[in-house]
Image (cartoon, grey):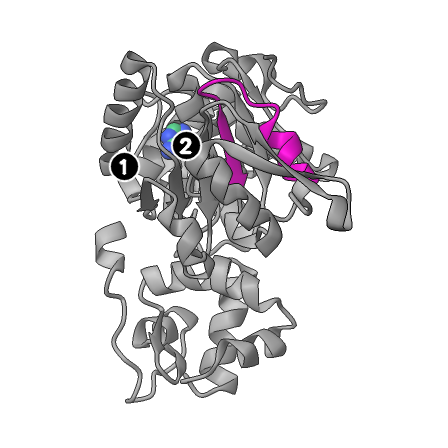
Amino acid sequence: MARKKHEDAGPGDAAGGESGAGSREIVPAEREGERAWQAALRPQTFADYIGQKELIDNLRVSVRAARENGWALDHFLFAGPPGLGKTTLAHVIANELGVNLVVSSGPAIDHKGMLAGLLTQLGERDALFIDEIHRLSPIVEENLYPAMEDFRFDLFIGDGPHAKAMAMQLPRFTLLGATTRMGLLSAPLLDRFGFHWQLRYYDLPDMTAIVQRSARLIGVGIDGAGATEIARRARSTPRIANRLLRRVRDFATVEGNGTIDAKIASSALDRLAVDHAGLDTLDRAYLTIVCERFDGGPVGVEAIAASLSEERGTLEEVVEPFLLQIGFIARTPRGRVATAAAYAHLGLPAPAKAPSGGGPQGRLF
Ligand code: ADE
């Protein structure tokens, strides 16, 4: 099965040496440009994949067992904030299994027929990736259960008292699920996965290696200090690192000699409003609101969202996980509190009640 060709082919041939076979995507058109870049920089094999070592080691074993015995791989679920590599892993797994991957997402599967359409595209041992799986509607989710358990899809022909139930047999397939909100997954759905794993934020050496690899693939020169500077400011998230790398490359090309060093990386990132801790405008606005308007908290996420005119979900899924990770906020039963480390970062005096924070940061940087 041919890989879907994107109009904006991103780095194109530069990544050609690592392009894998056999995946098919259903992609909203407006995101194709960014997605094409991500796809081009995506590792295709376990050997290319940097970081998440424990997970990759586990996956290697399961994938090898499935491949050598002709089994369909068990259904796997990956959880974690956006950009840590859940989609990438699905592509790597399908590639390593030598099977096709059909890609969709919870919100895109908005009725039972859509799910049937995806399942009937699958061949024996193929994989179906459902991103944002916590957003499946209850009716679609219910229809997924027999498919996952018994490789069966229940159809109803006709309406009312004359409706006839018909079971359609599906090939043995693997469901790969991804979620940014493990807590929103229903217990019956979670139960049907053979394995689930929380992806971690990447440490600085892994982030630096990812930036160096991506720079090589997009064909831009970068020295060690330049790669480290981008890595340090990318919120421990490969997708952000790849995005920042492309912006810094623009500055290096227009204002420098085309090669990225620490100086050009640092000045470009300053101008892109990405600070030394990797926080962007929304992260800083969040912290400033908690510290200044809510006196450091505790404050509920709804109140912060209303003050920022932001979606609560964006704060919970994108902003807060990293601020928690680096110890700038803490969660208490009464709401979020800003730590002394957050006040220090904003250059504000911390009230005595502020917890010290900064905890897990040591591990990362
Ligand atoms: N690009 C994005 N994520 C990556 C990873 N984990 N390893 C290598 N390249 C990547």
Mark 2–mark 1 contact, CB under 8 Å? yes
Q: Earlier in the sequence, mark 2 or mark 1?
A: 1
Name the residue: 32% across, 61% down. Answer: 326
Per the image, the residue denoted by label 2 is 89
Point out residue 64 in the picture as x, y percentages from the top left corner. Answer: 27, 19
Which residues fall within the magenta stretch?
113-130
Quadrant of res 349: bottom left
* Badge 2 amino acid: Leu
Point out residue 233 in the picture as x, y percentages from the top left corner. Answer: 42, 49
Quadrant of ligand 1 in image: top left
Q: CA distance from mark 2 to mark 1?
A: 10 Å
Q: Residues within 10 Å of mark 2 (few under 14, many from 20)?
A: many
Residue toward you, 254 or 189: 189
- The numbered disc on residue 55 is 1
Does residue 116 show up magenta in the picture?
Answer: yes
Q: Is residue 181 left or right of residue 68?
A: right
* Badge 1 amino acid: Leu
Instruction: Please identify the quadrant where the N terminus is shown.
Output: top right
